[in-house]
Structure formats: structure tokens, C-alpha cells
Amino acid sequence: MQRILIIGATSAIAEAVARQYAGRGASLYLLARDTERLTGLTADLKIRGASAVWHAAFDANDFERHEAILDCAIAEMGGVDVAMIAHGTLGDQKACERSFDLTLRELNTNAISVMSLLTHLANRLEAKRHGTIAVISSVAGDRGRQSNYVYGAAKGAVSIFLQGLRNRLCKSGVHVLTIKPGVVDTPMTASFKKGLLWAQPETVARGILKAIDGQRNEVYLPFFWRFIMMIIRSIPEAVFKRASL
Ligand SMILES: NC(=O)c1ccc[n+]([C@@H]2O[C@H](COP(=O)([O-])OP(=O)(O)OC[C@H]3O[C@@H](n4cnc5c(N)ncnc54)[C@H](OP(=O)(O)O)[C@@H]3O)[C@@H](O)[C@H]2O)c1
């Protein structure tokens, strides 16, 4: 029976991942801000077949509590096989351009909090020489664009952090997965007009489980984003800087 820790568990993508693990009979520990939603999700996952479900309140920006919360979760489950980090905010880029306080808040939520969690998780999994760390980054971290470069900078930093962590943890047999979704129909993107490239959280969740099972290093979801981003990354900066993206 797999022991799954999900941080940011009320995210639409994380919920879909949790439902799929519940269907496999896994035990789950859920961390998120909204404890009312966590209670509902816990009941739902038990009905779907989870062996056991625990939850606790967690605010990504309360860095001082990260270590204690993780220790508590890992002790309750008797270890951890998969730890997934899913929380995030798609901040208001224009507002960030006017306020560095806001920019800092976005960077804290989307990058620094993730690095704090990864630091504590990595040490624990490395000591046990076991487990998978999976983090939802984004295609937005592959190249900076005027429309979302604060969010993109945070995700890019997380992706680079994960590359280094993977290189370090490879020796201890700990698997590190970077998840790069394209555009997904979730509350985060509720105000966006949807089109052909959009995916549902369930599709992305299936891709996440497959990538974890297959011990992949990095996965674009859906797969075609790998090719889209290959093209976007190959555009010379002299051309890219003039584009309205
Ligand atoms: N949707 C997309 O198109 C897309 C594309 C690429 C990557 N991603 C990434 O996928 C991940 C999941 O997002 P989603 O699309 O599933 O969106 P979502 O449903 O809006 O989920 C975002 C989650 O982050 C949580 N969160 C935000 N700030 C937090 C904080 N300070 N402490 C704890 N939790 C916090 C939210 O909790 P509350 O409910 O308490 O606010 C919510 O559960 C994110 O990392 C996002 O950046 C999404």
C-alpha cells in the first residue's frame, strides 16, 4: 500500500491525483489551507477506496511550521512513498509590476515555500534512501513572457531547484519528478477563455501518476507541450522580445 503526501491538496489537479491514488487503495495525508474542504475531500477519498486519509491545515507561507508539519505527516503515515507539492497562485502580473511587495508574496508562495518544503523533504527521503518527490512546476517557467513573468520566474526557479535536487538525490535512490502542465481548466484559470490546448485536471492527474510510476525525471502534460515549448525556447531572444506574449 502506497503512502502519499499531498501538499496543496485542495488544488483541482491535486484532488484529481488524490482520487486516482484512492482508487488504488493508497493511504493519503493531505495538507491545505481550507480545512472544511479537506474534511469533504477526506470523506470522498475514503469512499473511493483509500486505506486511510489524514489531513492537517497548512499555509505555504508559514515557513517556520513546514518542518513540524512534514514530520507529523510522515510519522502518522509511518513513512512516505510519494510526496507531491501542488499549491500555487497565478498572481496579477500587472499588479506585481506596480508593487514589489506583491511580487515578493507571489515568489514566496510559488517558489520559496516550495524550496523550503523540498529542503526538509529531501533530507528525510535521502536518509531513508526511498521515495518520490513530485512537484507541479509549469511550462511558464521555461521562458519569461511579459504577460506572466513573475509567476514564470517562480516556476523556472523551482524547475532549476528540482534539477539540482534530482542530481543530488539520484545517488540515494530518491526519485525527483518535475511536472510541467500547459493550460489546465481549474479555478486558477477560471477567468481564461478555453480552447483546443486546454486539458482537464483528471487528464493531467493520469499523466502525473504514470510519470511517478515510470520514474520519469520531467514530464510535460499533456505531452504535446514538450514540442510547443521546444519551439518557444528556440526562438531567438532578438525576435522573442518584440512578440506580444
Ligand atoms: N491550471 C493551470 O493551467 C496550471 C498550469 C501549469 C501549472 N499549474 C500549477 O498547478 C498547481 C495546481 O494548480 P491548479 O491549477 O490545480 O489550481 P487551483 O485549483 O487554483 O489550486 C491552487 C491551490 O493552491 C493553494 N494555495 C495557494 N496559496 C496557498 C498557500 N499560501 N498555502 C497553501 N495553499 C495555497 C490553493 O488553496 P486555497 O484553496 O486555500 O486558495 C489551491 O488549493 C499549481 O502549482 C499551479 O501553479 C497550473
Image (cartoon, rainbow, N blue to C red):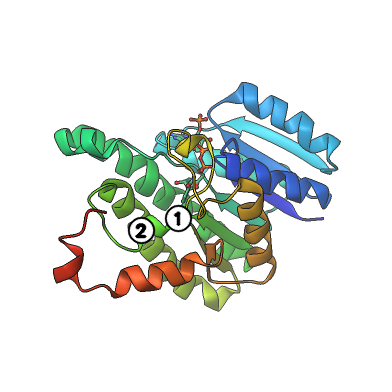
**Residue bearing the label numbered 2:** 141
Badge 1 local density, few (<14 within 10 Å), some, or many (20+)? many
Q: Is residue 33 left or right of residue 51?
A: left
Badge 2 local density, few (<14 within 10 Å), some, or many (20+)? many
Of the numbered discs in the image, which one, if any, rests on residue 137?
1
- Tag 2–tag 1 contact (CB < 8 Å): yes
Please tell me whether residue 201 is drawn above or below residue 35 in the rendered image.
Answer: below
Q: Residue at (57%, 59%) from the top-left corner?
A: 133
Q: Is residue 92 left or right of residue 28?
A: left
**Residue 75 in view of the camera:** no
Q: Residue at (32%, 53%) from the top-left corner?
A: 152
**Residue 32 position in % (x across, y down):** 56, 33
Q: Would the CB of label 2 be found within 8 Å of ligand 1?
A: no
Residue at the far front: name it. 196
Q: Residue at (64%, 60%) from the top-left corner?
A: 207
Which residue is more in the foreground, 58 or 229?
229
Q: Would the CB of label 1 be found within 8 Å of ligand 1?
A: yes
Which residue is more in the foreground, 192 or 216?
192
